[in-house]
Amino acid sequence: MKKILMVCLGNICRSPLAQGILESKVNSETIFVDSAGTGAYHVGNLPDKRSIEVAKKYGIDITNQRARTFVVSDFDKFDLIYAMDESNYQNLLRLARTKTDEEKVKLILNEVNANANHSVPDPYYGGSQGFENIYMMLDEACEIIAGKLS
Ligand code: 4NP
């Protein structure tokens, strides 16, 4: 079983979408996908309504998800840890204990444009267009990730 973790700040907007999109593209018998936040503001909450809505629009149900905080033991549990933005990436690297931990952490949009270090913008304070926008970015990245995994 290959294990993939999607990480953003709140674990209510971007990483739940990334989780749902990747889950929709892979075989759940061989690939486990989860998500977490580097911040604890929304622990236990459902994804943001706007993430739930845009996922639903494209046929994906993410209402089974609840926000949780990234924990250091996630480095042991997961094979690949995808950060949504540069700030999440730096936060994860600060928590890494070893070179092996560090090597698991990737910026998700580098799957689309290698080494470009683009971030999935935080859509929390914007409107629904921002969620449509991040959905498209994550769909493109997850298509590539799913292709590599299978
Ligand atoms: P996310 O978005 O990191 O994509 O889940 C955010 C959600 C909440 C907050 C920031 C970003 N917040 O500050 O509460």
Image (cartoon, helix red, strand yellow):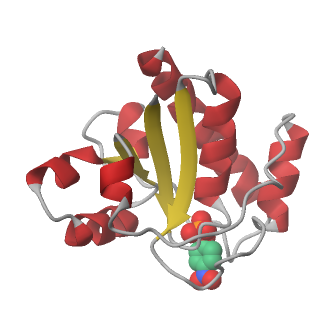
Q: Quadrant of ligand 1?
A: bottom right
Q: Is residue 60 visible?
A: yes
Q: Residue furthest left?
A: 99
**Closest to the observer, 15 or 1:** 1
Give the residue displayed 19% in from the left and 46% down from the top: 103
Estimate the x, y position of residue 76 in percent, counting from the top left: 31, 52
Quadrant of residue 138 in the image? top right
Q: Is residue 121 visible?
A: no
**Closest to the observer, 23 or 131:** 23
In the image: residue 38, left or right of residue 80: right
Vertical order, 3 against 129 (above or below): above
In the image: residue 109, left or right of residue 98: right
In the image: residue 14, left or right of residue 75: right
Vertical order, 6 against 26 (above or below): below
In the image: residue 59, left or right of residue 51: right
Give the residue displayed 65% in from the left and 55% down from the top: 16
Quadrant of residue 139 in the image? top right
Vertical order, 113 against 54 (above or below): above
Estimate the x, y position of residue 20 in percent, counting from the top left: 69, 42
Give the residue displayed 75% in from the left and 64% down from the top: 47
**Closest to the observer, 54 or 126:** 54
Estimate the x, y position of residue 88 in percent, counting from the top left: 39, 66
Give the residue displayed 43% in from the left and 55% down from the top: 119
Estimate the x, y position of residue 134 in percent, counting from the top left: 63, 50
